[in-house]
Structures are given as C-alpha cells and as structure tokens.
Amino acid sequence: MKRLRTLVLVLGDQLDLDAAAFDGFDPAQDAVWMAEVDEESTHVWSSQPRIALFLAAMRHFAQALQAAGRPLHYRRLDEPGNRGSLAAELQHTLAALQPQRVVMTAPGDWRVWQSLKAVVAGAGLALEVCEDRHFFSTAREFASHAQGRKALRLEFFYRALRQRHGVLMHEGQPIGGRWNFDAENREAFGPEGPGALPPPARFAPDALTREVIALVETRFAQHPGSLASFAWPVTRAQALQALQLFIEQRLPLFGRYEDALWPGEPWLYHSQLSAALNLKLLSAREVVQAAEAAYHAGRVPLESAEGFIRQILGWREYVRGIYWTQMPGYADRNALQARQDLPAWYWTGETDMACLREVITQTLAHGYAHHIQRLMVSGLFALLLGVRPQQVHAWYLSVYVDAVEWVELPNTLGMSQYGDGGLMASKPYVATGKYIQRMGGPCAGCRYDPAQRSGERACPYTTLYWDFLMRHESLLAGNARMALQVKNLARLSTADRAAVAERAEAIRRGAVGRSAARP
C-alpha cells in the first residue's frame, strides 16, 4: 500500500475549500483529517448554541469535502472510541496513516496550535503551517507594524490596510476626504424606536443540523444556553445568502445606528456575519468587496460602508495581530489587578438589572449579542465591578457562537476590560448607566435610576462608575483622555464618596442585582 503523502488538518473554524493548506492537494496521494471532540466544548463551559454551530458547520463541510472528491478521515463526537481531545485523535491517526507530511492553515487558538504541534513532533514530523488567505494581512506584517510602538492603535493599522488594498480610496486619498465617520455613526433611535426592521437571516435546521442539535441537547444538557431558536448559517451557500441580505436590507442604516440599543430587538441593523466569517464560510475579502460595491452602486451611504468595512478590514485584522504578537502571556494580563469573581447570574440571566437581564437572556437564547451590548453592557459591568479579566474572557469564549480565541481574547481582555493596561485601548471604556439609557437601553422598565449613584434606587452602573474612578484615581489621573472624568471626582464630598463605596460593596456582595448560584 502506497504511503500517504500529505495529511491536511482542518479545524472547526477553517471551513474553506480554498484554504492554503489545500494548495497542491492530490486526492490520489493526500487526505484530510477532522475531529469532533469533547475537549473543545469543555475546556471552557461552552454554550449549546456555540457547540451546535461548530459541529453542524463541520459536518456540512465534511459533505462538501466528500463532494469535492477529497479523501477524509472524520471522527464524530458520538462515535465509539472517540478519544476526547484533538491531540489524542491526531496521535492515533498519525500512527495509523503514517503520512510523510502534515499541513494545516494557521489556526486561531494558541492552545490548539501548541497541542497539535507537539503531537506532530512526537510522530517525528514538523507541522507545516500555511498563511491564512482569509485575512488581508499576516501576523508577521502586524509584528513589523508594531515594532517599536508602546501602544498599538487601530487607526494607524487600518489606514495602512486601506491604502495597501485600495479600499474606499481615490487617487491615494480616502473617499469623502476622511478616514472614518464615527461622528455620524453614534445615533440612538429616539423615543419612537427603530420602527419596522428587516427580519434576520435565519436558516431552518436541515436533517444533519437537527441531528447535531439532538446530540448537543443530550450530551451537553448541563451546558448553558438553548437550541430552541437555532437558525445560524452552517454552509457556505447559506452564509453567502446571509451576506446578500445584509448588504441589501441592513447595511444602508447600519452606520447611523451601529451603537444603538432597543429593548427586545437583538439584531437591529447588525450584520450577524461574524460567526460565518470566523468559521471561514465567508472570506473577509468578499465581505469587504460586497460592502464597497454597494457604496459605489449608490445603494449604501459612505458612513455605513466605511463603518462596516472598518469592523472587517480594520478591527478583525488588528485584534488578530494583537493576539499572535502578544500570546501566550497576553491571556494572563490584569493591569487593573481586578480580583472579583464573575457573578453567577452571568450564566443564567437572573438579575434585576434590566439591561443585563436582556443581554444575557438574549445571549443564552441565540449565542449572540451585538458589539455595543458586549462592550457597554455585559463588558462594562464586569469592568466596573472589578472582575478578574480571565473569568470574563472565559465567559465570552463560552457563550458566543462567533467566539474563536484570536478574536475574542483581545476584544475582551484588552478592549473591554483594559486588562492589557492600554496596549489596545487608549483608556478604559467606562460610563454610568446614563450612557445605556441614552443609547436606547431598557432603563424605563428597570427598578434602578441611572441618574442616581447612591441609595436604594441607584443604578449599579452609575454607582460602580464612580467607585471605579475612586479606586483607580491615581492610575487614571495620568491618562489625558480620562482627565475630565477624574476631575469630576472633586465634586463628590467625603460623605458622597462613602455612600458610593458602601453601595458598591453591597453590589459586590450580591446584595444588589440578585445573584443566583451557578448551576
């Protein structure tokens, strides 16, 4: 029997038939390896929607590989003898097949990369890692950009990528004469609300996905979340349809309302494409091209096109660069020395704070929350409370269907929790409950008052905001962007400060906000 030439490893977030690892693939000499294992759902307490999305997308991609005539070694989670981890499954496969080469596209998780690399080395081979063409830039290019910089700001990297790839550019200058339109993209809906919204792109589970749902509901019954409304795209065809619907129906108003909130409306004008992008069912390039083409065709205003493109060409590329240039030590950073445990109700939604109850309940139902809900509701509360950033990271990685560590960790630890001390963000993103109220949050139906910082009706966000400034006053005083906020502390009398501190301590004890025991 002829020895296998190349074994191509494909992970659950690498579902791209055109990935670089397949360059030169010969079905007569090469084969593909994929494995579903418990460890990838239990190393953090992954939610049922997240587990189901990965498994359903993987199984549909396995069908696509077989239809393309690529020999496949695929281990299902419920197969007898499943060894439970990627490392153990790969070790077994290498011993059985004895390939001459092992190749994969660059992974999105440091832990997984180190584990697979060690297994391949143990078999006497070197793991060959190909660049991921899904992205506009490479980790090496970001490292070159970062060299000599104490702080790594998105804006400079984003502009360089716009120029290099000619996106929204004309004769070397940004179209419209400006690099970003953030000032135009911060509107709230006002008291009348968003009005009629386009329905979200939802895809009824087919037989294969229903099989996965049944498996997850049984095998991971104790994991958080629900699959009752699962309808995410799990194939490339579905992802392309979701992209088209977003460009046509949501992108025109996306920019204006990208920071807005509204009770009972989880989707608003957001793309809901991050999961398909992060699983590589869509490429970043085709998404950016679709948005830019819609602008040039006159179907989308510039501020919406630029605001969305900034998220893809700018933010995703930037956080990936942060991750791969700063790991593994980045995951342990805790610049604010936060030591509080994450409240147990983050896993259940059982809190009397209306905004957090809505965001967490929505997250558990759909595995989704848009970026303002993540940054300025669930993330902001954890930051103000002083939660250990590693616990916040584990929660975000667990509950969201689009969570892959390369993108989730910098967003959570750096941008949301300021755990890296300002490497990413120029200041901690802190605000009182009045910000949530102003942007359309469900404050009208909440028992707490965002305008009050102490007393029984004080909004916990407002209390904790002032407590945060008090606790970190000396550190924040040296930050020019925080100067006005720190200066406002002088308005508080000694009695005011004591009242805030007392109320903040009650919140931390769980006496305010209602805390339930983690299941």
Image (cartoon, rainbow, N blue to C red):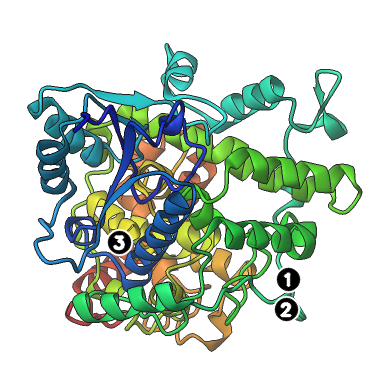
Q: Amino acid at mark 2?
A: Gly
The kind of residue tagged 1 is Phe
In the shown orientation, is residue 338 left or right of residue 418? left
Q: Position of residue 119 (x, y in %)?
A: 13, 34
Distance between the alpha carbons at the discs numbered 1 and 3: 31 Å
At label 2, counting other C-alpha atoms closer than 10 Å, the crowd grade (few under 14, some 14-19, many 20 or more) is few
Residue to which mark 1 is pinned? 189
**Residue 63 vertical position relative to residue 109 in the rendered view, above or below:** below
Q: Secondary structure at mark 3?
A: helix
Answer with the quarter of the image where residue 397 lies.
Answer: bottom left
Measure the C-alpha gap from mark 2 to mark 3.
31 Å
Residue 424 appears in the picture as rendered: no
Disc 1 + disc 3, Cβ < 8 Å: no
| Tag shown at residue 398 | 3
> Residue at the location (67% across, 20% down)?
164
The reply to whether dot 2 and dot 1 touch (C-beta < 8 Å) is: yes
Instruction: Tell me what residue is drawn at x 18 percent, y 33 percent.
Output: 1
Disc nearer the start of the sequence (2/3): 2
Q: CA distance from mark 2 to mark 1?
A: 5 Å
Name the residue located 17 percent from the left edge and 56 percent from the top edge. 39
